[in-house]
Amino acid sequence: MFLGIARDVGQFLNTGIITAQTELAERAASGDFFLLYDSSATTLKKIQTSNIVAASVNRTATGDGSTTGFTVTDGVIAAQCLVTINGVVQTVTTDYTVSGTTLTFGTAPEASDAIQIRELPA
């Protein structure tokens, strides 16, 4: 109903229609929708989550010789992670695993090792 009335994104935000909603505190399900403001049509449009190409997430850390667990995004699986230590690509399940929000190395990276975790879109 409000889609045909408002003519710019400011009107949507100022009415509280969008900003007053509860924030989703988890990964959106594939059947969920997002609202996008189409500036060329000056209206809101919906897009299904499954039609959005997610960007990869890059994380960096430094080894300390004892820490084996590092944070990743909830829902990411080991096969979606490209992991390097000092530029050397690590092998899924051999060198690391992922469970929940934790990527765990079988052996703790050495002190001052440069760790890069790239989470690739599903």
Image: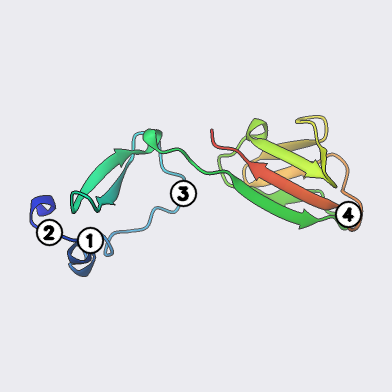
The mark that comes first in sequence, 3 or 4, is 3
Which residue was labeled with disc 1? 9
Mark 1–mark 4 contact, CB under 8 Å? no
Residue drawn 33% across the image and 58% down it:
22
Residue drawn 53% across the image and 33% down it:
122
Please tell me whether mark 2 sits on a helix, a strand or a loop: loop
Mark 3–mark 1 contact, CB under 8 Å? no
Q: Image check: 67 left or right of 70?
A: right
Q: Which of 98/83 is in front?
A: 83
Q: Image check: 87 left or right of 39?
A: right
Nearer to us of marks 1 and 4 is 1
Q: Image check: 61 left or right of 6?
A: right
| Label 2 crowd bin: few (<14), some (14–19), many (20+), radius 10 Å | some
**Quadrant in the rendering for residue 90:** top right
Please tell me whether mark 1 sits on a helix, a strand or a loop: helix
The mark that comes first in sequence, 2 or 3, is 2
| Label 1 crowd bin: few (<14), some (14–19), many (20+), radius 10 Å | some
Which residue was labeled with disc 4? 66
Return the mark for residue 6. Answer: 2
Tell me: residue 18, above or below residue 92: below
Mark 2–mark 3 contact, CB under 8 Å? no
The mark that comes first in sequence, 3 or 1, is 1
Residue drawn 77% across the image and 30% down it:
93
Nearer to us of marks 2 and 3 is 2
Tell me: residue 96, above or below residue 60: above
Which residue was labeled with disc 3? 26
Q: CA distance from mark 1 to mark 4?
A: 50 Å
Q: CA distance from mark 2 to mark 3?
A: 29 Å
